[in-house]
Amino acid sequence: MSGVLPAWTTDEGTARATTLFEQTFGAAPLGVWAAPGRVNLIGEHTDYNAGLCLPIALEHRTFVAVSPRADRLVRLVSAQEQSTVREVRLDDVAPGTVEGWPAYVVGVAWALEQAGHSVVGFDVAVDSCVPYGAGLSSSAALESAVAVALDDLAGLGLGGDDAERAALAAACVRAENEIAGAPTGGMDQSTSLRATTGNAVLLDFTPGLDAVDSARHVPFDLADAGLALLVVDTRAPHALVDGQYAARRDACERAARTLGVTSLREIADMLGRSESPADELPAVLAALDDDVRPRARHVVTEIARVGTFVGLLDAGDVTEVGPVMDASHASLRDDYEVSCPELDLAVTAAREAGALGARMTGGGFGGSAIALVRATDIAAVQDAVLAAFADAGYTPPDLLVAVPAAPAGRAA
């Protein structure tokens, strides 16, 4: 079976980052830190609408070997970027001043300083087994790994309990939004920093919630249920800074203003108290322009789907979540229009091969799909997806089996 991407062990990832650091900077790093990518089970494009989502952290991680410097210079090298050394002075970092992947690194330092913390320059070497551009939050994994490294090196005290990690995640979100220029919500960074082994994390982005109320860990033991979660990296081009993501976010903000609410979450909550929300939704959204209405419909119904999905998990009915996943994909494809032919094909092929449910995951416009399958059907579904892509003439996808993993932390 080809195309399956294993996660690195901690020792392997540490060795890779350490070797790159030593070869580049001529000395051993002070330490190595790592952070996971994530896959979202349900709740897409809801985080920036004050909504709910339910991701898990992946075993696939980004490793950063780091040593502090006595000055304000940051020197960066990445095994994924032809090992070219980049240099950025922290005093020069501001919105619009840093291009490319270094923005995700120095942006974290900048955001921590903006929050009142003291940060010095540093040398950093990056290596990762989180698929790049796959919609599995490789950028958030990089930000989170750097965040826990800087927290340890500067003694900031933000990497301990969940409340502290929520503050660290907020700095990473600000780095991505303001320095990297990607207008994403906070799901990715919150997952990488706050997830726990064996659990999905139900994230609530209602403004003003404290850390205790904004995250709940929901058991997600697929092996015990005889199931597995297959991730299909379609390898279709995926980017969140090309304007499409921002356009969707703008449409949601326009919808909220027209409806007289601060976020679409308020509409979802209002309908959630109704005895027949599906019947009332068209009338509630009738005031919206035709181009905005389907965007709002997706967000409102997706927030409801998160609640349904979590309710099934809480009841021990994990095998029943498949139809919820299917409905989510249809909404993302038809109402939010963020799918693509490769994602649709992955979803269709997985279902026809026996998946209980399947959907695109992540921001869309390329990236990855997920399929909930019986453990005994993993090989058959993988083979069916690979065959479907070959028949369509698409680039062969990469595949991995997702297991809820641990959050960012020190590796060595």
Image (cartoon, rainbow, N blue to C red):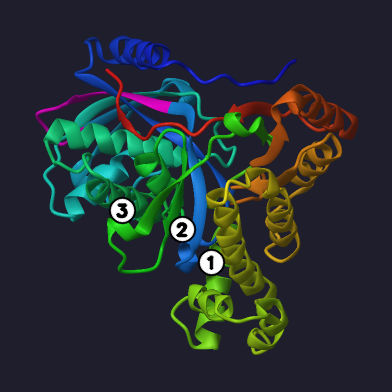
Closer to the camera in the image, 110 or 349? 349
Q: Identity of the amino acid at label 2?
A: Pro
Extreme residue in the right direction: 391
Give how far apart the Cα atoms at labels 1 and 2 are. Answer: 8 Å
At which x and y percent is residue 181? 43, 54
Neighbour tally class for label 3: few under 14, some 14-19, many 20 plus, Cα within 10 Å: some
Snapshot quadrant of residue 143:
top left
Give the residue at x 59% y 29%: 223
Give the residue at x 58% y 73%: 251
Q: Which of the two marks, 2 or 3, is nearer to us in this view?
A: 3
Give how far apart the Cα atoms at labels 2 and 3 are. Answer: 13 Å
In the rendered view, would you say 369 is above or below 294?
Answer: above
Is 10 placed left or right of 157 in the picture? right
Circle 2: element type: loop
Which residue is the site of mark 1?
249
Magenta segment, principal secondary structure? strand
Closer to the camera in the image, 261 or 200? 200
Earlier in the chain: of badge 3 and badge 1, it is 3
Circle 1: element type: helix
Q: Determine if residue 43 is in view.
A: no
User: On residue 183, which mark appears?
Assistant: 2
User: On residue 290, which mark appears?
Assistant: none
At which x and y percent is residue 349? 83, 38
Q: Is the Cβ of the residue at disc 3 closer than 8 Å to that at disc 1? A: no
Earlier in the chain: of badge 1 and badge 2, it is 2
In the image, residue 3 lies in the stretch drawn in magenta: no
Give the extent of the magenta segment: 62-73
